[in-house]
Amino acid sequence: MESPLLNYQCDKGIALITINRPEKLNAFTPAMAEQFIALLDRTDADDDVKAVIVTGAGRAFCAGADLSGGKETFGDISGKSDVVNADGSINYSAEAIRDIGGLVSLRIYRSLKPIIAAINGAAVGVGITMTLPMDIRIASTEAKAGFVFTRRAIVPEATSSFFLPRIVGISKALEWSFSGRIISVQEMLNGALISEVLAPELLLDRAYEIAREIADNTAPVSVALTRQMLWRGLDMQHPMEAHQIDSRAVAHRGRSKDATEGIESFLEKRQPDFKNKVSTDMPDFYPWWDEPKYE
């Protein structure tokens, strides 16, 4: 699939999504959000996809929300049904009022495939917050980031108030969010926002290397379960909650043909050939949570 806004390609189990508005520094639009969500629906449904890489075309990863709408960019709710009550107050429960960056982040959070952000340049506003629910973030020496919301008189979005403190700690998250200043790639690394910094020409190669290790050596159902177990574990209140899910998952996967293959391939010193599919072989207790509703 290819579009003016997002390019998609898949080769040998690794999908590459490229944000593709280089002339606008890949500034994000509602149409791009819809396409991004649709592409993740596609990668989840495709058992041939073992990992996903997200990067930007040109010199930016994503420069944030497209501000070409001027002062109404964040506040225009005209024409959106059920958003304004009869007395002029805002109906905060209306679907049409939902933050588009949040819709993208929530879809990333639900992904059954691991997602690697290859941050090739500036990642500002939604350009950086959309990477937070991705699993691995690496960056080019040309990268920089900015949680610039207070400088635009708005607030952090795209569910970043959930993810950012969990990744970098509450103090660093507040410092970056209060100031809205641009953060260098070295500061991103020091703050554990990213795990590696690479020369621009090596960035995608390294992303593919990480994805290739997953695609070639791991069981897709186990990866899908592990992704959800770890992310959702961040919100657990007691280790017993993790123990319950761990026990169910080990019991189910331990009886699978994949588990037999994992042991046999190890003993025979060969590459594994895992047959179970994410589309058909997730355990019967999955999902183990009730998905919250927006209200």
Image (spheres, rainbow, N blue to C red):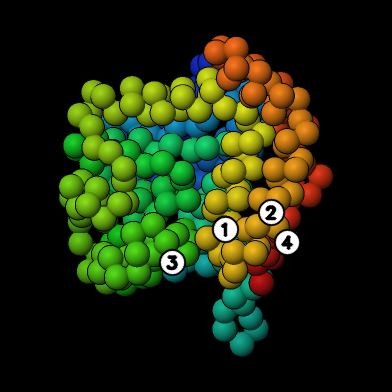
Give the residue type at disc 2.
Ile
Q: Quadrant of the C terminus?
A: bottom right
Q: Nearer the viewer, mark 1 or mark 3?
A: 1
Tell me where residue 169 sits by quadrant.
Answer: bottom left
The residue wearing badge 3 is 161
- Label 4: how many Cα within 10 Å (few below 14, some 14–19, many 20+): few
203 vs 104, nearest the viewer = 203
Question: Separation of disc 2 and disc 3 at Cα?
Answer: 26 Å
Give the residue type at disc 4.
Asp
The residue wearing badge 1 is 233
Q: Secondary structure at mark 1?
A: helix
Q: Residue at x 53, y 20 (%)?
A: 216
Q: Closer to the N terminus: mark 4 or mark 1? A: 1
Number of numbered discs: 4
Marks 1 and 2: in contact by CB < 8 Å?
yes
Q: Residue at x 46, y 22 (%)?
A: 212
Q: Quadrant of the N terminus?
A: top right
Marks 3 and 2: in contact by CB < 8 Å?
no
**Is 209 positioned to the left or the right of 177 in the image?**
right
Q: Nearer the viewer, mark 3 or mark 4?
A: 4
**Is 16 positioned to the left or the right of 83 in the image?**
left
Q: Nearer the viewer, mark 2 or mark 3?
A: 2
- In the rendered image, the residue lying farthest to the bottom is 87
Question: Separation of disc 3 and disc 4 at Cα?
Answer: 21 Å
Marks 1 and 4: in contact by CB < 8 Å?
no
Marks 2 and 4: in contact by CB < 8 Å?
no
Residue 290's tag is 4
Q: Closer to the N terminus: mark 2 or mark 1? A: 1
- In the rendered image, the residue lying farthest to the front is 267
Question: Separation of disc 4 and disc 1 at Cα?
Answer: 14 Å
Question: Separation of disc 2 and disc 1 at Cα?
Answer: 9 Å
